[in-house]
Amino acid sequence: MADYKMVYLFGEEFEELQAKVKSENRELKDLLGGKGANLADMVAVGILVPPGFTVTVDTCNLYSAAGGKMPAGLEDEIRACLAEVEELTGKQFGDPSNPLLLSVRSGARESMPGMMDTVLNLGMNDAVAAGMIELFRNERFVWDAYRRLIMMFGNVVMGLDREKFEHCLMEVKKELGVEEDTAVGAEAMKKVVELEKEVYQQLKGEEFPQDPMAQLIAGVRAVFDSADTARAIEYRRIHKLPQSMRTAVNVQTMVFGNMGDDSGTGVAFTRDPASGEKVLYGDYLVNAQGEDVVAGLRTPIKIQELEEKNPAVYQQFLDICAMLEKHYKNVQDVEFTVERGKLWMLQTRNAKRTAQAAVKIACDLVDEGIIKGSEVIMQIDPDQLGHLLHSQFDPKAKAAATVLAIGVDASPGAAAGRVVFTADEAIEWEKQGEKVILVRRETAPDDVGGMKAAQGILTAVGGKSSHAAIVGRQLGTPCVVGCAAITIDYAAKQFKVGDTVVKHGDWLSIDGADGKVMDGAVAMQDSDIFLVLRGEMKAEDSPTYQYFHRVMAWADEVRALGVRTNADRPEDASLAILLGAEGIGLTRTEHMFFDDPSKPEEERLRTFQKMILAENSEERETAAAGLLPYQRADFYGILKAMDGKPVIIRLLDPPLHEFLPSTDADREELSRMIGKPAQQIADIARGLHELNPMLGHRGCRLGVTHPEIYKMQVRAIFQAACQLKKEGLNPIPEVMIPLVGSLGEFTICRGYTEEIAKEVMEAEGVEFEYLIGTMMELPRACIIADKIALQADFFSFGTNDLTQTCYGFSRDDVEGRFFDQYVKLGVFEQNPFAVLDREGVGELVRMGTERGRKTNAKLEVGICGEHGGERLSVTFCHEVGMDYVSCSPLRVPIARLAAAQAQVRKPR
Amino acid sequence: MADYKMVYLFGEEFEELQAKVKSENRELKDLLGGKGANLADMVAVGILVPPGFTVTVDTCNLYSAAGGKMPAGLEDEIRACLAEVEELTGKQFGDPSNPLLLSVRSGARESMPGMMDTVLNLGMNDAVAAGMIELFRNERFVWDAYRRLIMMFGNVVMGLDREKFEHCLMEVKKELGVEEDTAVGAEAMKKVVELEKEVYQQLKGEEFPQDPMAQLIAGVRAVFDSADTARAIEYRRIHKLPQSMRTAVNVQTMVFGNMGDDSGTGVAFTRDPASGEKVLYGDYLVNAQGEDVVAGLRTPIKIQELEEKNPAVYQQFLDICAMLEKHYKNVQDVEFTVERGKLWMLQTRNAKRTAQAAVKIACDLVDEGIIKGSEVIMQIDPDQLGHLLHSQFDPKAKAAATVLAIGVDASPGAAAGRVVFTADEAIEWEKQGEKVILVRRETAPDDVGGMKAAQGILTAVGGKSSHAAIVGRQLGTPCVVGCAAITIDYAAKQFKVGDTVVKHGDWLSIDGADGKVMDGAVAMQDSDIFLVLRGEMKAEDSPTYQYFHRVMAWADEVRALGVRTNADRPEDASLAILLGAEGIGLTRTEHMFFDDPSKPEEERLRTFQKMILAENSEERETAAAGLLPYQRADFYGILKAMDGKPVIIRLLDPPLHEFLPSTDADREELSRMIGKPAQQIADIARGLHELNPMLGHRGCRLGVTHPEIYKMQVRAIFQAACQLKKEGLNPIPEVMIPLVGSLGEFTICRGYTEEIAKEVMEAEGVEFEYLIGTMMELPRACIIADKIALQADFFSFGTNDLTQTCYGFSRDDVEGRFFDQYVKLGVFEQNPFAVLDREGVGELVRMGTERGRKTNAKLEVGICGEHGGERLSVTFCHEVGMDYVSCSPLRVPIARLAAAQAQVRKPR
C-alpha cells in the first residue's frame, strides 16, 4: 500500500494522491470519502471553499480494526493541519481575540444519510464567546451559536438526549411568552446557554469541555463511531453498500450565513432532479445557517430569487454550477453559504434523481457535448431503471391511501381491483369486465387461470419463491405474498386485518414493489415505455421512451455480457425481445400443463395427472403421448417468437405430487374423469408426499427414474423445431436438464435426448444445431463441473436453488422469519436471495465456471436465477466471465445497463 | 507410467515388476489382478503351477477406454507368451498329435465372483479331439471335455443360452434311459458333442470355431467384457469396490484331475474359515475336474482323507499350504489338481472368513510368529468386525424363518418380540416383562419412551436418518425402517404384508443388519464381547473377547486418527469408553427433553413446550430457567462418565415445531397442563410449520433469534462442569454451535457462550479449559472455513447434513425412492449416506479442513456424521488429516481398526 498521511488539507497533494490511489486500483473517494474528495477537487480547480482538512477513510479503518482506539500520531497530524488552516484563514482555534470555528462532518465513499450529523461551531467556549461578542458586535448571534454547539456536541458527539437540550430554549420562550426563536433576545439566549450547560453537566456527569482541541478530537471520534449506528447499517443494506464501508471526517472552517441580510445559505441542484429539466433548482435562506434550511423553520426563497438580492453573487454561483457540471460531467447537488456578500462553496456531489430525470439528463448531457454516451450510462442506477417500466400508483394518491398491511414485495407493479377469494371467481369477474385482486392463503397450480385473470395477487403465506410469487413475476402480475397480517375467512368471504374487515367485492390496491396493501382503489398511472412497446403510443410522442431507448443503446454498445430472458409463453418472449433480450435463458415447462390458450385447461392437466398416476412404464408412455401435441404447440410458439435466438428449455422440474389434487372433493372429481378409484389416487399421492419437497424426487431424478416424461418433452421440442425449420425459420433449442448432481444423471438424460433428436430430425428430414446442457443449482454440480462440462454444451446457474442448498435453507421457510433480524444483526449484508452472495454461493458459481471451462473451452455459461436481473449480481456474473445473464422480461433493461456498467468498471 | 508389456508369463520379470509397480505406488495385484499376482508369486517361489500367462489389468483398461476395441499388438504378445508356454509344456496349441489345452479366467485386483466364469479346455476342435483319443486312449473323457468346451464357450464367451446346451446331454440320457452323467458312454457323449455343435450353429448363426487361436482371443475379450455385467456392478457396490475396477485375464495350461483314480481335484482353506481353528479345511474329489466340485454332483471327501489315498501328495500339499501361509502371512484358500499322481497348484488367495475366525486367526498368526500384531490388523475387515458385537440370530434358525418383508437396515442387531403399535403399550408390556417389537408408520419424539422399552423398532416409512433410525442407533436398539411392504391398520391393531396378517401380540423378529422382517420368534444368540463388557462374563472365559481385545490393542498402537463416540446418555458414553472411545464427538441435546431417568418425562417436555409457546423473550427466559436444572443434570451425567475426556455438546438443533403436539387431543391436553388455549397452541404450531423443515428455522438460526434457549443450555453445561471440577474431576466441555453458514451466526453465539462461561466460572470460583466450535454441515461453511476458523476452536463435520445439502436431497425423501435404481444405473457407486462421497461432499470436507487449518493451526477437526464409523469414510478422514472420527458406540471398534489400516496404507 502506498504511504499515506492520515490527514490531508483540502486540495493538498491533489495530483499525487490521485496517482497513488489509482496505482492501488482505488478512487480518491475511497481515501477521502465522497465529500472530502470533492472538496479537495474544488480547491484544486480554484473554487472558493472554506479551508479545512480530511481525516482519511483508511484512518477510520485503523480505528475500527483497533476496536475503537485512536491511531497513534493522528492527533499530531490534526494539529499540523489545523495550524495550516489557521495560517490560511488568519484565525486561531480557541483564540478569543480572533477565533477560528470549525464544523465536523462525516463523509463516506458514498453519501450516507444515516451517519453522524454535522457539528457546527466547534472551538467555542466561554472565553471565545466573550471574544466573539467583542469582535462581531452581535451578542445574540454569539449566544445562539454557542447554545447550538452545546446541544449538537452533547447530542451528536456525546449521545445525550437532544430533547433535554431543546427543552432549555422552550423553557425560556415560555418564560418570555414568545413562540418564535427569533423573538429570543441576547440575554435570554445567554440564559439558554447556561441552562444547556447545566443539562450537559447533569446528563454527562462533567462540564461541557472548554478545551477546543478536546471538542475537535471528540468530534472526530464520534464520526468514526457513527459508521456503526443502526441507521447507517440499515442504509448500507438498503443501498447495497458493503457493511465494511467506513467514513472519512471533514473538518472545515465555519462561515456564517447568519451575519445579516448580505449573508445567507442555500442548497441547489444544477438541474431539476425530478424532471431532469435544465433549470437550476434549489432554496436560499437569507441571514441563516444551513441548519435552519434543513430544520424547515423558515420558508426559503427560490434560488432564482437570489439574483435580485445579489446579482453578482448569483452570477458567480451560476458560473460555478456550470463549471462543476462540466468538471464532474454530471448534475450536482451543492451547498453554499454567503457570508457578508462572499460566496463560499461548502460541498458538491452528484445529484440523486428520479429515473425519469436520470434518462433525460443523460441524453441532455450527451447532446450538450459534456459527456459521451458510453460514459453517461454510469450515472444511472440500474435498480431505479425498473421504475420507468412498472405501472405505478399516482404518488399523491398513494401517499393519501390507507395502508392496511405490508407483505413481501414479490412481483413489482401497482394493482387495484375488487377482492375475490377463488381463482374461478377471478376468471368469472374478469370476463364480466371487472378488475379483481385475487386474495388467497396461498396459491396452487390449479389457480393459474385465476391468477392470469387478476390485476394483482395477495397471499397470506409464502415467500418470494412461493408459487404465487413465481407465477406473478412470470405473468408480470403485481403480487404481494406472505402478508401475515391478514386473516382470511373463505367461508365468510372476507379477510380481516387488525379491526378492518375487507369483504368480497370491496376495492383493494396492492403495490408489488413495496408490499403495501391499501384500502380502496388507489389511482394509477401507466408508463409511457409500456404504451410505446405495446404499440399504444408512438415513440415520437414519448420523450421518456426516447431517452430510455437512447440510454439502452449506449449500454448495448458497451456491454460484453449477453442478456436473455426467463419466459414461459410466447407473449412474454416477444415483450422481452422488445426490451432487448437476446434469447431465452429459461423456459419452464411445468406451467405449460396448466396453461393453453387453445384448449380447456382441464384437459391437459388431466392428461398430465393420468401420467403421474400411471402404474407402469407403458401406462405412463401412453399418457405422455397424449401430452405430446400440447407440448409441441407450446414449444412451437416460443421457438417461433424467438426465431433465430437461442431458447433454453428446461425439462420438468417440480416433484410430481405438486400436480395432484389435495382435497377429497378434487380427488373424487379426478377419479370420475380418469376412471381410477379416488382411494388409489389418494394412495399414490400419499406415496409421492415428501417431507422436504425442495430436496425430493424432482428434476433430472425424474428424468432418470421416469424417463417417459422427459422423452415426451424432448420429442415435442424437436418436432416443433423441425416444423419451424420447414417453415423457413431458424429455431435454436437448447435442452436443459435440471438439478444434476451426479455425472451419471446427465449422461443418461443426454443419451436419450440425443437419440430422440436424431430420430425426429431424420424422420422430418431436416437438420439444425441444438445444445444439451444442465442447470447448475447444486453445490455438488459446481464441484464436479469439470466432469460435467466434458458432456454438457452449456451451464446455466440456477442461483435460487444454489443459494438454498449452499446455505441450507429454504426460501419459503426462512425468508419471512429471520432474514430481517439477520440483516439487522449484520449476519447478512444483504438478503442473499435478492443479491447474489459472492463469498459463498458466488464461490461455487466461480468454481463451476472455471472448472467447466477448463475441460470445455466452448462451454456456454449463464445464469437464470432471479439474480440475473439484479445490479450487483450482474456485475459478479460479468466478472466471473459468464456469457450471459437471464432475467424476467421487465428486468432485461436493468441487466443490460448493469452489464454495461460492469464492463466500464472492469473491462474484459 | 512405467513401460509395461500387456502380457506376462506367470513369474516373468517378477522382481522387476514388483519394483516397477511399487515406484507407481501400486501393488502387483493392481497390474496382474489378485489371481495373476499370486500365480506369478507361486511360480517365483518354486511351487508347481501349470504354465500360463496373465493379460494385465491395464490392458483391460485400454480396452474399456477404447470402447471395447482390442488394443493393437495384444494378439502378438499373446502369441509370444503362448509360444513360451508351448516350450515349457512341450505341447502345441491346436496340434492334434500333442495338444496343449488352456483355461481362461478373469482375475481382478479383488476377487469378484460376479465376473466371468472359467472356460476350460480351450484349444479343442474336431482334429484335436481325434488326436487326443489317439493319445489318451480314453474316448469318453475326450468327448466329455469337448462337449464341456462347446457349452462353456457358447454360454460364457458368446452369451448363448446355457440351458439349450444342457438340454443336449439330457436328451441323450433320456434316449439311453439313464440318470447319471457317468452312465453316458463314449459314443453317446460323441452324440452330445454333435448336438451341441448344432445348438451353437442354430443360436449363433455360425459354426463352433475350430481355430484354437480364435477361441482364445474370444475368451480374452469375453473376460474383458465381463467386468461390466450387472452382477459385477452389484458385487462391487456391495463390497464397496470402485466401479472403475477392471480385470486381468489368466490363461493357464489345463491339467486333468479326471484322468483316473490317481487323479483328482480339490479346494482347501489352510485353516477353518468359520471358527479360525488351525486345521486344514477342504474337499477333494477323486477322478474329477474342478467344475464337478463346484457343481456339487458328486460328494467330495474331506481333504484329510487324501492322506490315505496318496500320502506323498498329501504331505506335499501340507508343505505347500504351510509355505503359502508363511509367504502370504495369511490363511490361504487354494485350488489344486492331481494329474496322474502329480500335484499342481491352480491358485491361491487370502481366505474369506467370519469375524470370529478373523480375530482368532490374527492372534494365532502373531503367536506363531508368522506376522506382527501391527501388520495382522490389515487382514480383518472392519465392516465385519461389527458382527462380533451385535446380538445375532442363530444362523440356522434364521435360515429357516419365514421372511415377511425386507425394509431398510437402520440400526443393526437382532430382535424378537411381540407386536405392539403404540409407544405407551410398549412401555406397559415391557413393565410386565414382555419383549415387544414396536411397529409404527413412523415415530415421533413422543415415542422415545416406548422405543426404549422395545426390543426392536419397525416402521413403514422413513430412511436411515428418520427419527426411528437415529433414535434406534442411539439406543442400540435394532431397527428396520421404511418397510413399505407393510400396511398398518392402527384401528384394527394389525398390519398386513401381502396376504399375511400380523396381529397385535403376535411374535415378530427383525434383523437390523439386513432389514429382514420375519414371522415368529427366531432363536437368538448373544455376543460374548457384550457379555464381558457388561460384566456378565469374565474376560478369561471368552476367547472371542480376548482375540478381539488383542486385535484392538494392535490397531490402537498403529492408528494416528482419534476415535470418539456419538452419545447422548451417560450409559452410552460408558459403553463407548469400554469399546475404546477417546471422547465424545457429538452429544445431541434435543433428545434430553424426552428422556430423564429421575423425573417423569412429561414434566420436562411440558416445560420445553412452554418455552416454545412463549410469546416474548421474558416468558421464554422464565421457561428456560425451568429447564436449567434438567439440562444441568444431563450434562453432569455425561461429563462425569467421560471424566478427563473431551465432550462435544451440540446446542439445540431441530426446528421447534417438532416438539409440539400434532393432534387436537394432544393439544387439548397440553392446553390443560400449561394453561394456554388450545387454539393458541394450534396457531403457534401452524406459524412454526415448515414446508421443508430440514431447511428451516433450526440450529444456530434459533441461537441467533431465540438466544434464551442456547443461553440456558450453555449455563447448564458450565454449571455442571463447575460442579464436577469442585468434586475433583476433570470435565472438558466443547460447546458446538450447529448449522453455521455465516460467520455472524457463529460470532453471536460464541459471544454469549463466552460471557456465560466466564460468569458461571467466576460465580462458582473454579476454572477449566473449554472449546467453542461449530458443526460443519453446510457447503457455505466449508467455503468460508478460513473465516470461521479465526473464531472457532474446532470443526466437526456433520456429513449427514452436508451430504444432503451438497447433493440437494433429503435422505428421508429420496433414499427409499430412487437410490437403488441410481446404484444399478451406476449414477452412484455407493449410497452416499453410507459411504462418504469423496468426489463431491469429500471435496467440501477437504476444503473446510484445509481452509480452516490455514488460519487456525490449532483447529481441532473431526467428523460426527454417521460416516465416522464406516471403513472407507474413516480412511478418507485419515487422509484429509482430521484429528478424530466420531461414531455410535457400537461402531467405535470398527473406526479404530479402519483408522489403523488407513495409517498403514498412507502413514501420516
Image (tube, coloured by chain):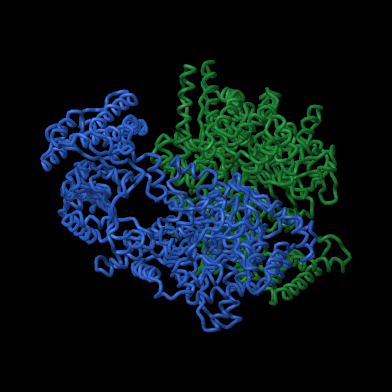
Chain colours: A green, B blue
On the rendered image, what quadrant is the N terminus of chain A found in? bottom left
Q: On the image, which quarter does residue B62 sit in?
A: top left
Q: On the image, which quarter does residue A249 sit in?
A: bottom right
User: Residue B882 location in percent, x, y?
Assistant: 41, 62
User: Residue B77: in sight, yes or no?
Assistant: no
Name the foreground residue: B7 vs A62: B7
**Residue extending farthest front:** B177
User: Residue B389 location in percent, x, y?
Assistant: 45, 64
User: Residue B177 location in percent, x, y?
Assistant: 33, 33
Q: How many marks?
A: 0
Measured along the vertical axis of the image, is residue B554 above or below residue B10?
below
User: Residue A697 location in percent, x, y?
Assistant: 56, 42
Name the foreground residue: A621 vs A128: A621
Name the foreground residue: A573 vs B526: B526
Q: On the image, which quarter does residue B415 sit in?
A: bottom right
- Does residue B304 appear left or right of residue A517 in this picture? left
Identify the residue shown where x is 27% and y is 45%: B290
Identify the residue shown where x is 21% and y is 35%: B142
Name the foreground residue: A302 vs A555: A555
- Does residue A15 appear left or right of residue B29 in this picture? right
- Does residue B10 appear left or right of residue B178 in this picture? left
User: Residue A521: in sight, yes or no?
Assistant: yes
On the rendered image, what quadrant is the C terminus of chain A found in? top left
